[in-house]
Image: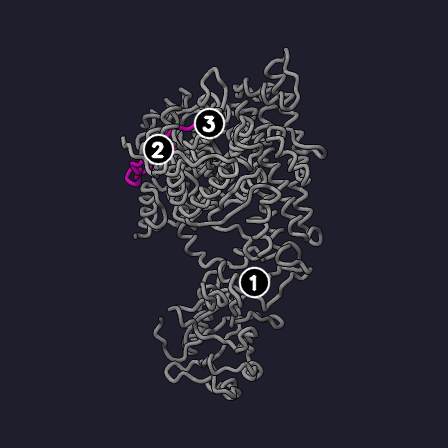
């Protein structure tokens, strides 16, 4: 189990994302019971991915929960299932409390919350609690995805730009 | 376990992997690690890039697209991708067959004067299958007629391939009933490409059945022509002793490695290295002689016919260069890693391509032509000899690992070995199976793949089969793997074989593992199975036999084609890692279950070699029961008498 540091989330470098959906696949497998692609396909209900490769015009982006500071989903949640982890700043979900009203799905400005219709609950990025790294980041073949704090991500982008100059 | 121990089971290879690590030279396992994790869509076979509306991917977890833009379901996409792999595999084998047929024609015409039709006995027998009247005709005349008939079968449009007539009658009827008897070798491959074009065949069973037809055209066509005509042109192999592994490279000799598949070049190279002028030149440069070794299936071709050493199998091609002792590696076609040129650049090794079908950027190309075979071969060898002076002896590390083996078994000499010189029969084999001394037979074949520890699956699977009194026949890189582990010697029967199998090996004087050649020589296994059926007592069809097949470390498209022609001939076939079909439940179920009702054979996927061996044993026992044969004679599993 990983020791969680504060304010980590998954960022996508839109200049590197090619929309291959490897992150989606890896996310679903990571959230399966078996954590193996062949066996995951036989599970019922099928495991749910919590990330989506989206495109809009020229931009392709792998969209994840942004773990917003002032999260609209938490405000919208009527059962108190969604809350902030005070230590890490992550938006976390108590599955037991979720009633499947989908208010969070509607409220999320990133479309990052997914309906799990079979279990009648909402599911979202939980930052891979069962592993030390992040399944989508590891799976990304171009290195577009990055796990870290906002400052770290900014630094990374600036360093990249400096190199290109 | 250290990294090099995880990568290969073979100590010689482990040493070279360590050397690569130390010298920071990138080899196949490094590239494999860098590629992780691999694309799930590709692994599951649900990515379609057949037309420009795509690429399309099916979401296997349900909430994304479930059909391609054209509406193709995951079943259609998986089936189309799979049969396109068959097309490529069958094309590779068959093109090899075509080249041999072409060489036979040139030799018979006297245009390729470095070749002589050495297998006259087989020439006559094969000519009869093709309905050629051999009476009073010269060898060359028969060879010419046969070569022409074989070449015509590649482009044949109607009827059936002649060699199908060598299969059991019942099997031929199954093919005809299902409409999958191949009409022509190339035709079925081309038809795969047509059927899988956008908007053609989208009934997955129909797609796969046609794939089977093309695969049968490989096994009973292209590959069989390659084997039979090679035997005619270069002589039928006979049991022969040889050596294997990187230890066959010599510190004080000019080392020449022939790598690839077709024997047309490698066979004349065996003559070229005996050339006195070249030997004198080697001496002049301070070498004691010229040491010719093979790699991959070319190794198997010259091993079977000339007893020349094999330096290793597919995953050892870079490692041979890493010994620092290879002056020249000449390659023709198939399974030649593009990475060879960069590894060769780290040493003095000269890489030479010879086939117009396989060139490398920046690598010297000496085109091989049958008409001037020996001259070209000598020319290439000379380049190697002249390169000896560039060898840096301080960088030479040749692993000392070397093992003896016996190779050179064929359908024909199996008859003679089993029945004796005057009784041409496989009867003793059938009797041994019927009496329960042998449980059955298994073919363990196929490639290497860095996704499984090099050689490990081959060796462990074969040992487990031997313990359970299953006679094993092998080809290709699998045979080389087991040879390196010492399984291809008669003595290995004492160490590894069950009691019954050991008794048979002792009585007949054979190793418990029979090496029948290169990957096109899998066609020999089809003919051995047909001969066992014809001998009687074990059912009327190949699917009745207590036999099974496996490709535990498969990687190439050729392996898929081979798998399909074995399943299509009625053989239960276990692949190690799954074929890229798991994205479609229907296709997976069809080829691993339903297909058995029509074809008699089916696939299974199991990466654990011991579990896979027991799946094969269970199948063999099922077939024994269906034939109403008794229990196997000896219950104890390991041999009790040790040498």
Q: Is residue B390 magenta?
A: yes
Q: Is residue B208 visible?
A: yes
- Residue B431's label in the rendered image is 3
Give me the residue at 47% from left, 66% from top: A32
Q: Earlier in the sequence, mark 2 or mark 1?
A: 1
At mark 1, the secondary structure is loop
* Residue B16 percent across, percent down from the top left: 33, 44
Residue furthest top as drawn: B136
Please give the residue where the numbered disc 2 appears in the rendered image: B499
At mark 2, the secondary structure is helix
- Does the residue at mark 2 contact the one at mark 3 (Cβ under 8 Å)? no
Q: Earlier in the sequence, mark 2 or mark 3?
A: 3
Crowd tier of the residue under label 3, counting other residues whose Cα lies within 10 Å: few below 14, some 14–19, many 20 or above: some
Please give the residue where the numbered disc 1 appears in the rendered image: B60
Q: CA distance from mark 1 to mark 3?
A: 50 Å
Residue stretch rendered in magenta on the structure: B387-408
């Amino acid at each position: 189990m990983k020791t969680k540091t504060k304010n980590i989330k998954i960022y996508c470098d839109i200049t590197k994302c090619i929309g291959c959906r490897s992150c989606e696949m890896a996310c679903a497998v990571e959230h399966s019971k078996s954590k193996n692609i062949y066996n995951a396909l036989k599970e019922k209900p099928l495991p749910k991915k919590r990330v989506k490769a989206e495109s809009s015009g020229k931009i392709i982006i792998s969209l994840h929960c942004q773990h917003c500071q002032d999260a609209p989903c938490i405000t919208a949640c009527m059962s108190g299932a969604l809350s902030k982890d005070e230590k890490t700043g992550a938006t976390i979900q108590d599955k037991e409390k979720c009633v499947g009203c989908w208010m969070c799905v509607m409220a999320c400005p990133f479309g990052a919350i997914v309906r799990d219709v079979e279990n009648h609950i909402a599911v979202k990025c939980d930052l891979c609690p069962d592993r030390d790294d992040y399944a989508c980041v590891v799976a990304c073949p171009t290195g577009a995805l990055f796990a870290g704090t906002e400052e770290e991500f900014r630094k990374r982008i600036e360093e990249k730009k400096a190199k290109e100059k | 376990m250290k990294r090099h121990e995880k990568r290969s089971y073979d100590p010689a290879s482990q040493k070279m992997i360590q050397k690569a690590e130390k010298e920071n030279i990138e080899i196949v396992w490094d590239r494999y690690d860098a590629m992780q994790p691999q694309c799930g869509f590709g692994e599951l076979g649900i990515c379609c890039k057949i037309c420009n509306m795509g690429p399309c991917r099916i979401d296997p977890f349900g909430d994304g697209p479930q059909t391609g833009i054209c509406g193709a379901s995951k079943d259609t996409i998986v089936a189309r991708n799979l049969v396109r792999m068959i097309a490529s595999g069958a094309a590779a084998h068959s093109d090899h067959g075509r080249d041999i047929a072409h060489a036979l024609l040139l030799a018979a015409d006297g245009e390729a004067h470095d070749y002589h039709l050495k297998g006259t006995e087989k020439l006559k027998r094969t000519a009869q299958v093709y309905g050629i009247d051999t009476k009073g005709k010269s060898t060359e005349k028969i060879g010419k007629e046969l070569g022409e008939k074989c070449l015509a079968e590649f482009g044949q449009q109607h009827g059936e391939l002649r060699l199908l007539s060598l299969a059991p009658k019942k099997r031929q009827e199954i093919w005809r009933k299902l409409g999958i008897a191949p009409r022509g070798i190339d035709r079925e491959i081309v038809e795969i490409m047509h059927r899988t074009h956008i908007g053609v065949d989208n009934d997955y069973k129909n797609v796969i059945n046609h794939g089977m037809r093309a695969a049968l055209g490989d096994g009973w066509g292209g590959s069989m022509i390659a084997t039979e005509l090679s035997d005619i042109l270069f002589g039928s192999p006979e049991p022969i002793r040889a050596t294997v592994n990187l230890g066959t490279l010599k510190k004080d000799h000019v080392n020449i490695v022939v790598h690839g598949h077709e024997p047309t070049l490698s066979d004349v190279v065996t003559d070229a290295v005996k050339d006195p002028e070249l030997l004198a030149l080697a001496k002049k440069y301070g070498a004691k002689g010229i040491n010719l070794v093979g790699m991959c299936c070319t190794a198997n071709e010259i091993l079977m016919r000339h007893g020349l050493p094999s330096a290793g199998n597919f995953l050892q091609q870079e490692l041979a260069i890493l010994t620092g002792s290879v002056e020249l590696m000449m390659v023709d076609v198939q399974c030649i890693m593009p990475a060879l040129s960069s590894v060769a650049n780290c040493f003095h090794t000269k890489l030479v391509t010879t086939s117009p079908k396989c060139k490398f950027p920046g690598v010297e190309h000496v085109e091989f032509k049958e008409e001037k075979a020996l001259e070209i071969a000598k020319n290439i060898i000379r380049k190697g000899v002249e390169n000896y002076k560039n060898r840096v002896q301080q960088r030479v590390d040749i692993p000392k690992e070397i093992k003896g083996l016996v190779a050179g078994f064929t359908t024909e000499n199996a008859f003679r070995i089993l029945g004796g010189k005057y009784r041409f029969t496989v009867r003793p084999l059938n009797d041994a199976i019927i009496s329960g001394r042998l449980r059955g037979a298994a073919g363990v074949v196929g490639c290497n793949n860095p996704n499984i520890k090099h050689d490990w699956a081959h060796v462990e699977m074969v040992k487990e089969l031997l313990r359970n009194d299953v006679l094993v026949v092998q080809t290709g890189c699998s045979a080389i793997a087991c040879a390196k582990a010492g399984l291809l010697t008669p003595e290995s029967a004492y160490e590894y074989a069950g009691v019954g199998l050991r008794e048979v090996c002792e009585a007949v004087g054979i190793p418990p593992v029979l090496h029948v050649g290169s990957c096109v020589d899998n066609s020999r296994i089809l003919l051995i199975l047909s001969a066992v059926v014809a001998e009687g007592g074990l059912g009327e069809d190949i699917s009745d036999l207590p036999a099974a097949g496996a490709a535990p470390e498969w990687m190439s498209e050729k392996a898929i084609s081979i798998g399909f022609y074995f399943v299509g001939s009625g053989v239960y076939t276990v692949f190690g890692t799954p074929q890229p079909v798991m994205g479609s439940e229907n296709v997976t179920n069809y080829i691993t279950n339903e297909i058995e009702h029509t074809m008699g054979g089916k696939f299974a996927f199991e990466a654990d070699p011991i579990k896979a061996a027991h799946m094969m044993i269970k199948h063999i026992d099922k077939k024994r029961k269906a034939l109403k044969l008794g229990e196997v004679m000896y219950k104890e599993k390991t041999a009790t008498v040790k040498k």
